[in-house]
Image: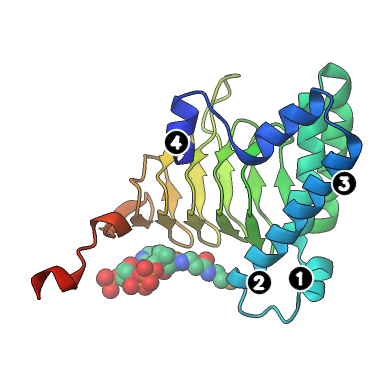
Amino acid sequence: MGLLSRARSGRRGGLVRGTAASLDGRSGAADLRGALAAVREDVTAARHRDPASTSDLQVLLTSPGLHAIWSHRLAHRLWGAGRAGRLPALLLAQATRSVTGVEIHPGAHIGRRFFIDHGMGVVIGETAEVGDDVMLYHGATLGGRSMERTKRHPTVGDGVVIGAGARVLGPVAIGDEAQVGANAVVVADVPAHATAVGVPARVRRERAHPEELVDPAIWI
Ligand SMILES: CC(C)(COP(=O)(O)OP(=O)(O)OC[C@H]1O[C@@H](n2cnc3c(N)ncnc32)[C@H](O)[C@@H]1OP(=O)(O)O)[C@@H](O)C(=O)NCCC(=O)NCCS
């Protein structure tokens, strides 16, 4: 089930569910094991997506996008822990921004194996929701268009790629496995498996859903 369907049915997966469990009193050791497993899968995902990477250690030590998401996970837990956690969460997010150039509001929900290549200039707003296996390039923004204290940032499905400098603005939905081109400005929903480019972004092409691809063997 993709993020968009999970959001509609009120279910949240992955790290968000893990966070809730740990706030309910899951043991510190289990927490640590979970965090290490998440780091491991992040590094593996980054190596798949960055052809310039040379080793797990190099990715672990030199990827600002990974450092930003690891810090965000802590900030998100602080944010979710109640009023007392809010200021520390924001301070941590600010410190992370200074070091990595990536600004993620601690309230943003981000899924597993999230990777930001190059890091610098990425902004993700408070009410953004991002699925699993999403990749952003530098300068991408998941921003708002309204000053109202309501859901005002995008919902990004699983497996989405958002190109360098792209702006996705407002409570729009980017469907699973969609691609947003570099420097696009997205102000309307993008269907699953589509590629959207330009300003304002238009769907250039909708790729076939893998399940819809017909096995050529059936014609033989
Ligand atoms: C949008 C994108 C995902 C499409 O990739 P693709 O599926 O391989 O598609 P193609 O390259 O075949 O392009 C399809 C069409 O969209 C156009 N196009 C591609 N990217 C575009 C962009 N960012 N803005 C405007 N038009 C774009 C192409 O010119 C082509 O047009 P045509 O059909 O008239 O020839 C890709 O071009 C892109 O922008 N990726 C982001 C990569 C990035 O940010 N890299 C930073 C590395 S540091």
Q: Quadrant of residue 88?
A: top right
Residue 51 screen position, x and y as percent: 61, 79
Q: Residues within 10 Å of mark 4 (few under 14, many from 20)?
A: many
Disc 2 target residue: 47
Q: Residues within 10 Å of mark 1 (few under 14, many from 20)?
A: many
Determine whether label 1 and label 2 are within 8 Å by CB.
yes
Say which residue appears at 75% left-offset and 60% top-offset.
Answer: 40
In three-dimensional space, the C-alpha distance between marks 4 and 1, rounded to whole angstroms, equals: 30 Å
Amino acid tagged 1: Val
Q: Earlier in the sequence, mark 3 or mark 2?
A: 2
Specify the quadrant that holds the N terminus: top left
Q: Nearer the viewer, residue 88 or 61?
A: 61
- Work out whether mark 4 precedes mark 1 in sequence or the reverse, and give the earlier one: 4
Which residue is tagged 1? 59
Q: Position of residue 104 (x, y in %)?
A: 71, 43
Rounded to the nearest angstrom, the CA distance separating label 4 from label 2 is 27 Å
The three-letter code of the residue at mark 4 reads Leu
N-terminal-most mark, 3 or 4: 4
Q: Is residue 50 above or below residue 81?
A: below
Label 3 to label 2, Cα distance in Å? 26 Å
Indicate which disc, 1 or 2, sits on the residue closer to the N terminus.
Answer: 2
Q: Amino acid at mark 2?
A: Arg
Number of marks in picture: 4
User: What residue is shown with label 4?
Assistant: 4
Q: In this figure, which residue is indicated by the disc labeled 3?
A: 95
Give the residue drawn at x 43%, y 56%: 180
Q: Is residue 203 left or right of residue 161?
A: left
Which element type, helix, strand or loop, lies under badge 2? Answer: helix
Split into 4 quadrants, where in the image is the C terminus? bottom left
Query: Residue 179: image x %, image y %?
Result: 42, 57
